[in-house]
Amino acid sequence: MSMKRKILSFLVVPMLMLTGVGCETKVKKDEAMEASVKQNKKEDFSKNLEYLMKDFSEQSKEIDDIVKSSKSMKKKSEKLKEVSKPYLELVDKISKLEYEEKDHPVQQNVGVAMIHVKDGVAIIQEGLDKGKEYEVDAGVERLETASKLIDKANKELKKSK
């Protein structure tokens, strides 16, 4: 179990860095950002990504907590099914963000990371359903790969600002 904790912590930390967790937000700003995400303008890619990644980070922490919990695989499976639907919807939103040419390196890394996240969650879910620890571990490895890509995207995003 400790290996999972280490691996999943690699996923959460870069996401927290990318999202700037701890920064003050206001309701008006959140409403403006939600509208911006819905409009999905290319020139707003960076700020839309940062906004969505904040939610992504919070939901990733929830997934991490489920996998690390001491509950039975069956209970983990049920909880993951419940939590993963909105999580995967958010992953789709992030993947579909429009971007300008200058943002391509960031989008490419984030896009590939989101593919790994989808696959990782699916593999973890399947492993929990079947009661196979090695499948859960394989899913966690996918999430670790996603974490590295998100970290790389974070560096690219900071470089482009």
Image (tube, rainbow, N blue to C red):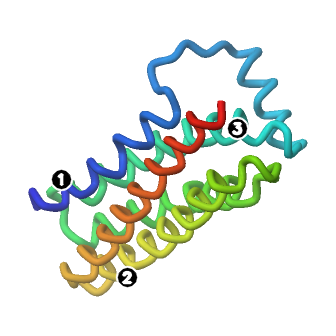
Q: Nearer the viewer, residue 142 or 87?
A: 142
Mark 1 vs mark 2: which is more N-terminal?
Answer: 1
Q: Which residue is mark 2?
A: 126
Q: Which residue sits at x=67%, y=53%?
A: 94
Label 1 and label 2: CA atoms lie apart by 21 Å
Q: Nearer the viewer, mark 2 or mark 3?
A: 3
Q: Nearer the viewer, residue 26 or 150?
A: 150
Q: Nearer the viewer, residue 80 or 97?
A: 97
SS for dot 1: helix
Residue 103, position as x, y percentages in the image: 72, 48
Q: Which residue sits at x=27%, y=82%?
A: 135
Which amino acid is tagged 1?
A: Lys
Which amino acid is tagged 2?
A: Glu
The quadrant where residue 157 appears = top right
| 2 and 3 marks in contact (CB < 8 Å) | no
Label 2 and label 3: CA atoms lie apart by 34 Å
Q: Nearer the viewer, mark 1 or mark 2?
A: 1
SS for dot 2: helix
Label 3 and label 1: CA atoms lie apart by 29 Å
Q: Nearer the viewer, mark 3 or mark 1?
A: 3
Q: Which residue is mark 1?
A: 6
SS for dot 3: helix
Which amino acid is tagged 3?
A: Ser
The mark found on residue 46 in the picture is 3
| 3 and 1 marks in contact (CB < 8 Å) | no
| 1 and 2 marks in contact (CB < 8 Å) | no
Q: Is residue 1 left or right of residue 145?
A: left
Residue 85, position as x, y percentages in the image: 57, 62
